[in-house]
Amino acid sequence: MVLYLLLLTFAITILIAITASRFLSTSAASKHRLPPGPKPWPIIGNIPHLGKQIHVSLQRFSHLHGPLISLRLGTQLLIVASSPAAAAEILRNHDRLLSARYVATIVPYDTAELDRKAIVWSSNCNNDSWKAFRSMFRNQIFSARAIESQASVRERKVAQMVEYLDGKLGEPVRIGEVVFAAIFDSLSNLMFSRDCIGFESSSETAKRLKSLIWRMMELGTKTNLAEFFPVLRKMDPQGLRREMFRCCNELYSVWQPYVTERRERRRGRERSGVEDFLDVFLENGLDDDQIDWLTLELFSAGTDTSVATIEWAMAELIRNKGAMDKLREELKSSL
C-alpha cells in the first residue's frame, strides 16, 4: 500500500511538472514571439535533439527552421544565429543591447561580485568597472607600444622552448605540455616578471599549476545540470562549482605572495625597474580580489585556446606528411 502511494505521488508530480512546463513554454513563446525551432520535450526541452555532434544538429535545424532559431535547454532559452545576416544583426546592428555575457553556473561567484572585478566574465559590459578595465587594458597593457616593448619576453621564451625540444631530440615529447609551459611562463613574465613553471617541470609548484589549469579546463567542459535548471544552482548537485572554487583559491595562492611583495616594495618606494602588468594593476588602484580574478582571466584566455590549437595543428601535420613537408620547406625558405 505504501509503495502504491509513493508511485502515485511520483506520477502526479511528474504530470504536474510536464503540464507546468508546457504551459510556461507556450506562454513564453506567445509573449516574446520567439524565432521558430524544433518542438521541445517537456522539462528537458531540446537537449535530446542536439545529439553528440551539436554543430551538425544546429546546421540541420537552420535548414529546417531558418537562419534564426530558438531552442530550450532545460528551462533556458537559447537563440542561435546561423547566417551572416543574422549574425550581423546581433553582433553589429544591435550589439549595444546584446553586448553581455552569460555567466556560467560553474563560475564560483555571484553576478554582482563578477561585475566588480571581471572583464571577460562580467555580465554587464556597460558598468563603470568594466569600462575602467577596458580602458586600462587598451591604453596600458595591450597598446601597440606596450606589445612592442614585450617582444623580447616572447622571443626569449620561444628560444628556450626550441632549445628544450632540441635537447629532447629522438625522445617522445608531450607537445601540449611544452607549449603550455612556454605560454604560461611568457604570461607570468609579463605579469610578474618571473617564471612560474619552467620547461623541466621539476618543482612542485609547476606540477600543481599545470594540474590546476587543466582541471579547470576539464570542469568547464563538463555537462552541468545547473546550467539547464538554475533552480539547482545553489544545490550544485555535481559539486562542479565547489571544485572550481577550490581550484581558483589554489591558483590565487601561487601569485598572492608576488602581489604582497610588490605592494610592500612600492610602499618603500622600491621599484622593480621593469614595469609589468602587476605594476599597472597597482597603479590603477585595484584591490587583491580584482588582481586575482583578472590574472586568472589572462592566464585562462592565454593558455587554453592557444595550446589546443597548436596541439591539434601538430596532430594534423603528423597525419598529413605532404602538409608537413610543405611547411618544412616554407620554414627553410623564410628562416
Image (cartoon, rainbow, N blue to C red):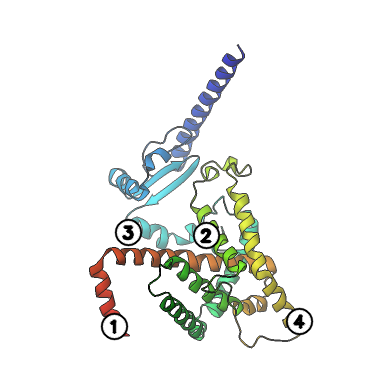
Mark toward the start of the polypeptide (4 vs 3): 3
Query: Is there a contact, CB below 8 Å, between mark 1 and mark 2?
Result: no
User: Foreground: 168 or 142?
Assistant: 168
Mark toward the start of the polypeptide (1 vs 2): 2
Question: Callout 1: few (<14), some (14-19), or many (20+) C-alpha neighbours within 10 Å?
Answer: few
Of circles 1 and 3, which is in front? 1
As drawn, which residue projects farthest toward the bottom?
273
Quarter placement of the N terminus: top right
Amino acid carrying label 3: it is Pro
Amino acid carrying label 4: it is Arg
Amino acid carrying label 1: it is Lys
The reply to whether residue 108 is in sight is no
The residue tagged 3 is 84
Amino acid carrying label 2: it is Trp
Q: CA distance from mark 4 to mark 2?
A: 36 Å
Question: Callout 4: few (<14), some (14-19), or many (20+) C-alpha neighbours within 10 Å?
Answer: few
Which label number is shown at residue 214? Answer: 2
The image shows residue 112 at horizontal and vertical percentages of 64, 56
User: Foreground: 150 or 332?
Assistant: 332
The residue tagged 4 is 267
Query: Is there a contact, CB below 8 Å, between mark 4 and mark 3?
Result: no
Quarter placement of the C terminus: bottom left
Give the side of residue 249 with respect to residue 174, left or right: right
Mark toward the start of the polypeptide (4 vs 2): 2
The reply to whether residue 316 is in sight is yes
Q: Quadrant of residue 309?
A: bottom left
Q: CA distance from mark 1 to mark 2?
A: 34 Å
Asked which secondary structure carries label 2, the reply is helix
The residue tagged 1 is 332
Of circles 1 and 4, which is in front? 1
Asked which secondary structure carries label 1, the reply is helix
The image shows residue 147 at horizontal and vertical percentages of 49, 81
